[in-house]
Image: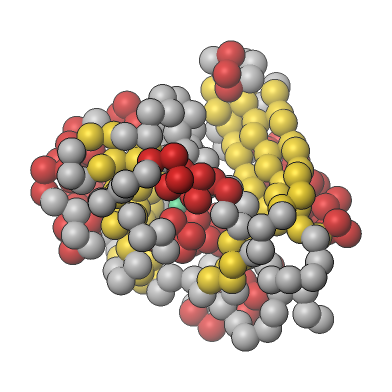
Amino acid sequence: MQGETYFSVRMRASQNGSHENGGKHISGGERLASFNGLKDAVNALLDKGLSHSRGKPDFMQVQFERVDEPIRPLQPLQIETNEVCTAEDGRVLAAALLSKAGVPAQSIDKVFQEIDQYSDVRGAVLFDIDSGKRIDGREEKGVRVSRLDWPEADFAQWAASHGAPLNSRIKEALAIATKVCRHPAVIAELCWSDDPDYITGYVAGQKLGYQRITKMKEYGDESGCRVFFVDGLTDLKTCIDDLEKKPVLIQAGGKRWGDH
Ligand code: PML
Ligand code: MG
């Protein structure tokens, strides 16, 4: 993506004070926008943070900054939806899919044992399958995948042609999974929402695609997770930097972003 200047726009909202002062995480969001699109992006993120099932925020930060690196266009991962009846079935299926993606059984078991601790992490946990340990060292902050977006018109076309709901949650989650699974050190991602009214989660991998699982927890439960399984990581700082800062735009159709 060349020519126009783009900006990374980020929002985070919490309750009972800011995140760093122990507030409860309510919502976060990321966009990439041209200068003319900044107002819409900021307004969309403001709306997202203000109308959330996790509660009303009393702290919000919305910031934007110019992106100097070229933006990489990526095709979204293939999507599939797996219907399950119970959260237990969902987690068993998630474990099988992680195994199919190449995550060893010991790492899968360890992550599911530690999953309650991971629900306090605002971003993602980086779990190394060699050492069988969490390695990001970011405590409650975790790794915040940023600088990514999927333009609405392209997403709408993609959703119509894949029979997928026109839902910004899917758009955002599939964009994250696509960016993260493209990283050479990432084997797979496991995620489900921390929102009490949303129980679908997914396992994703570059070959596996984006495998939605319709029930990963019970309604009312506010614990979610996002875990990136990594292998052969030689430089942790660069990997975190890539996930957080390398700009990516999801583009399912042939049209260049910015074309009209
Ligand atoms: C989230 O809401 O934070 C994650 C949502 C994951 C599942 C999205 C989907 O339905 O595919
Ligand atoms: Mg959430």
Q: Is residue 151 above or below residue 223?
A: below
Residue located at (70% from left, 22% from top): 58
Q: Is residue 71 left or right of residue 7?
A: left
Q: Position of residue 32 (x, y in %)?
A: 70, 56
Q: Is residue 214 visible?
A: no
Q: Position of residue 171 (x, y in %)?
A: 56, 62
Quadrant placement of the C terminus:
bottom right
Which residue extends farthest right? 36
Near-viewer residue (186 or 222)? 186
Q: Is residue 64 left or right of residue 149?
A: right
Q: Could you tell me how many numbered marks the image carries?
A: 0
Residue located at (49% from left, 29% from top): 141
Q: Is residue 249 left or right of residue 189?
A: right
Q: Position of residue 234 (x, y in %)?
A: 32, 46
Near-viewer residue (154 or 247)? 247
Q: Is residue 148 above or below residue 24?
A: below
Q: Is residue 247 above or below residue 229?
A: below
